[in-house]
Image: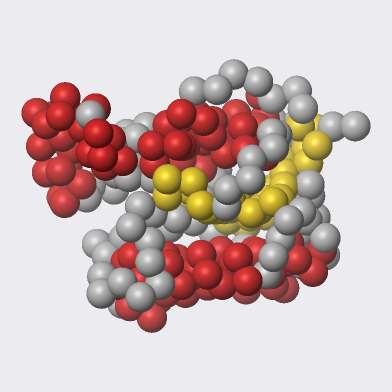
Amino acid sequence: MAKTAIVLGATGLTGNILLKLLLDDERYGHVTVFGRNSCEIKHPKLEEYIIDLFQLEHYANKFKADEVYCCIGTTKAKTSDKDTYIKIDYGIPLAAAKLCKSNGIDTFLVISALGAKKNSRIFYNRTKGRMEAAVLALQIPNTYLLQPSLITGEREEFRLGEHIFKLLMGFLKPIFRFGDLKRYQPIAPETIASCMVWLANNDYDTARIKSKKIQELGEQID
């Protein structure tokens, strides 16, 4: 029987690539998207709900699938208010995980960040770390927390910090191929999306997936 999936964040860089992978994958017969804006894709497998993601729990009766992929995330540039930032990067993934738990969905994958740590002094890393801890506490059988380094690719919004960092990486990229520095090597959104699909369809016994391992698994061919 064909599998079903839910995608949150399908209008984002990685989420949009992931959605297209799932729609093109013969193993999946139906993909549901929940989002604030339309992903503007027409496909016989696709069902889309335009909602307020801060009220995701109100759609529990629609939140049913074999797998849930959460690609939700924001930045300080887009969301300067810390309370709103927490509601997005912590609240939405946790709400989705709670729905997985209550609706008997055994596979939950979420994009976190390299450096996520609940006791970090860095607000961004601390928020991601708290999210990870809260999600893991729900004990969903197949939970995967992907911790990528800087994600490459062109976004709709301009991010000055990322732009500068990417320029530097263009010069420094060769040195990130060796030793411990490999963990900080920028990673393509296509690789992250491929890794998520691979994890959902293969046995893997580690919940937290570091950037280097995402790169390795994202290159696997089923």
Above or below, 49 relative to 184: below
Q: Residue at x 59, y 19 (%)?
A: 221
The image position of residue 189, as x and y in percent, is 41, 35
> How many numbered circles does the render carry?
0
Does residue 90 appear left or right of residue 188 in this picture? right
Closer to the camera, 173 or 34? Answer: 173
Check the image and report above or below for 4 versus 109.
Answer: above
Is 75 displayed left or right of 128 in the figure?
left
Check the image and name the residue furthest to the front.
179
Q: Residue at x 82, y 63 (%)?
A: 103
Residue 140: percent from left, percent from top: 71, 60
Residue 50, x across and y down, in percent: 62, 57
| Position of residue 135 in the picture relative to residue 152 (left or right) | right
Is any atom of residue 49 visible in this view? Answer: yes
Q: Residue at x 26, y 40 (%)?
A: 180
Q: Nearer the viewer, residue 132 or 180?
A: 180
**Whole-percent x and y of residue 143?**
64, 54
Query: In the displayed image of the protein, which residue is found farthest to the top?
Result: 221
Which of the image's four quarters has the C terminus?
A: top right
Colour mapping:
secondary structure
The structure residue drawn at horizontal position 24% and vertical position 62%, both measured from the top left corner, is 77
The quarter of the picture where residue 20 lies is top right
Q: Is residue 12 visible?
A: no
